[in-house]
Image (spheres, grey):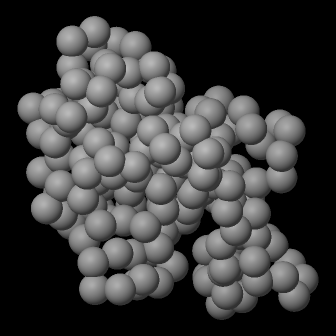
Amino acid sequence: MFLQEVTAVDEALLNRFKCSNNDDKVGSYLRNEAVAHHKKSLTKTHVVTNGEEIIGFYAMFADSVQVFKNKIQQQGWGLGGKQKQFPAVRIHYMGVDQKFEGQGYGSALLYSALDVIYEMNEFVGINFIALEAINGTEEFYQQKEFVHLYSVNRDLNMMVLKIESIQD
């Protein structure tokens, strides 16, 4: 398996990628927007291939996340003061091709992204990893210690992971 930037992947491979979640909105992002966003540094997208097919990908960008005092206290996060906005890295999209679903690649992709973010935290202040989980995927992220903050809309739920939760 190879992890590489989306700009290094053949367009024909990108066009064959398809996710089964949410009417393939995730796959559509990879096929239609990821390369342009990567080149403009709006997101940075990395794909995992087996040399012949894209297994999955993730796209991330720098962000901040609003966390209210009651959630901070409830979770025991120890972020005192009056601050409500905290530095974060957003996992914008993450997906596994439908041919490879259910084989552990989603967890492997997430852990790869978390490794990158953990390394970034040595150089840039990061309190949280944030993502908008598509309905039906929340349990996957909760198993990885992500915490539900709020519903963004009827299809998306804002979830966060405290940076200290990532282990070496």
Q: In which quarter of the image is the C terminus?
A: top right
Image side of residue 19 versus residue 129, left or right:
left
Give how far across and how far down residue 93 sits, in percent: 40, 52
Q: Is residue 157 above or below residue 60?
A: below
Which image quadrant for residue 1? top left
- Report the residue at 66% width, 80% height from top: 67
- Report the residue at 32% width, 47% height from top: 32
**For this rendering, which residue is in front, 15 or 136?**
15
Image side of residue 45 versus residue 73, left or right:
left
Residue 166 shows in the view: no
Q: Is residue 149 above or below residue 101?
A: below
- Report the residue at 40% width, 49% height from top: 33
Q: Is residue 12 above or below residue 124?
A: above
Give how far across and how far down residue 48 sits, in percent: 36, 24
Which image quadrant for residue 56? top left
Give how far across and how far down residue 39 sits, in percent: 58, 38
Residue 122 shows in the view: yes
- Report the residue at 81% width, 73% height from top: 79
How many numbered callouts?
0
Q: In this view, does 78 lie above or below 12?
A: below
**For this rendering, which residue is in front, 32 or 160?**
32
Image side of residue 26 versus residue 122, left or right:
left
